[in-house]
Amino acid sequence: MDIGSSIILETRLKITKTNG
């Protein structure tokens, strides 16, 4: 797994929780 990909996935989860 790429570190960048992991960071993007984590960021997306944070954004989803904030919006949801």
Image (cartoon, rainbow, N blue to C red):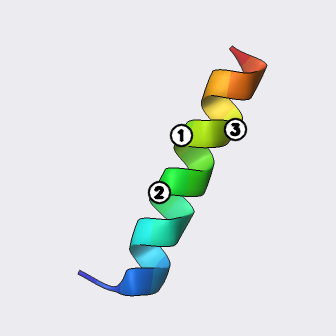
Helix, strand or loop at mark 2: helix
* Residue 1 in the figure: left or right of residue 8: left
Rendered residue at 62%/39% (across/down): 14
Residue 20 lies, in percent from the top left, at 68, 14
Q: Quadrant of the N terminus?
A: bottom left
Distance from the alpha carbon under mark 1 to that under mark 2: 6 Å
Label ID, residue 15 = 3
* Mark 1 Cα shell of 10 Å, populated few (<14), some (14-19), many (≥20): few
Q: Amino acid at mark 2?
A: Leu
Q: Which residue is mark 2?
A: 9
Q: Earlier in the sequence, mark 3 or mark 2?
A: 2
Residue 13 lies, in percent from the top left, at 53, 40
Q: Which residue is mark 1?
A: 13
Label ID, residue 3 = none
**Extreme residue in the top direction:** 20
Are the residues flagged by discs 1 and 2 in contact, CB closer than 8 Å? yes
Are the residues flagged by discs 1 and 3 in contact, CB closer than 8 Å? yes
